[in-house]
Image (cartoon, helix red, strand yellow):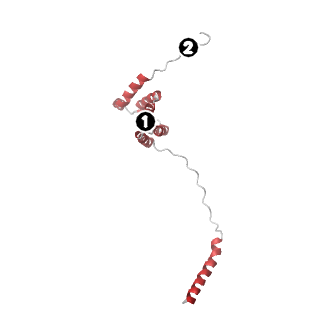
Amino acid sequence: MRCFLRAVLLAALALGAAALPLRSQKQNHPKPAPEEPSTYQPPAAWKSVEIGNYYLRKRDYPGALSRFKEAVQTDPHYPGGYLGMGKVYDKLGFKEKALEAYRQYLDLLPSTKDALEAKDVQKAVARLEKEVPPVRKSSRRSPTGR
């Protein structure tokens, strides 16, 4: 029985040793072409607004603002991005920017009826208009006195 096991073991070693040179030889397989790096494709404006609203609920204002700006860049005619920007700017204390974003939102609504139904935004615009002094043109005279 021992002789039989030695013979099997020797045969297995011989077969393994014979296959070794085949494995070590380089095989010339064509390499796949390297893929071009993909550029970032932002999601649709509505999706960016949805994500921005999530961040807004979590009080991550910088994260929300970046998503709302992304929505405006993706589709400048989508009103939801401006509404979100107005809310974030209002929370952060940037009253002028909030007022501007809210006004843009109201201008982009598809109908006058929608704009009239946006009571919360209208209240925010009225409040911000009281808080933000209107920008006046300079009344300085020119250096020559004319």
Q: Residue at x 38, y 30 (%)?
A: 121
- Quarter of the figure with residue 81: top left
Task: Count all numbered tags in the image, as a single digit.
Answer: 2
Along the horizontal axis of the image, is 27 left or right of 84? Answer: right
Q: Residues within 10 Å of mark 2 (few under 14, many from 20)?
A: few
Say whether disc 2 or disc 1 marks the residue closer to the N-terminus. 1
The CA distance from mark 2 to mark 1 is 38 Å
**Secondary-structure class at tag 2:** loop
Quarter that holds the N terminus: bottom right
Question: Hey, which residue is sitting farthest top in the picture?
Answer: 145
Q: Nearer the viewer, residue 134 or 75?
A: 134
**Secondary-structure class at tag 1:** helix
Q: Can you give x and y, in whole percent of width and height, for residue 138 in the image?
A: 53, 16
What kind of residue is marked 2? Answer: Arg
Residue 84: image tag = 1
- Quarter of the figure with residue 89: top left
- Quarter of the figure with residue 125: top left
What kind of residue is marked 1? Answer: Gly
Q: Which residue is mark 2?
A: 140
Quarter that holds the C terminus: top right
Along the horizontal axis of the image, is 11 left or right of 119? Answer: right
Question: Hey, which residue is sitting farthest front in the picture?
Answer: 2
Along the horizontal axis of the image, is 85 left or right of 142? Answer: left
Q: Residues within 10 Å of mark 1 (few under 14, many from 20)?
A: many
Q: Nearer the viewer, residue 13 or 85?
A: 13
Q: Can you give x and y, in whole percent of width and height, for residue 26 in the image?
A: 65, 68
Q: Can you give x and y, in whole percent of width and height, for residue 37 in the image?
A: 58, 50
In the rendered image, the vertical position of residue 121 relative to residue 6, given as above or below: above
In the rendered image, the vertical position of residue 118 relative to residue 30, given as above or below: above
Q: Can you give x and y, in whole percent of width and height, for residue 28 in the image?
A: 64, 66
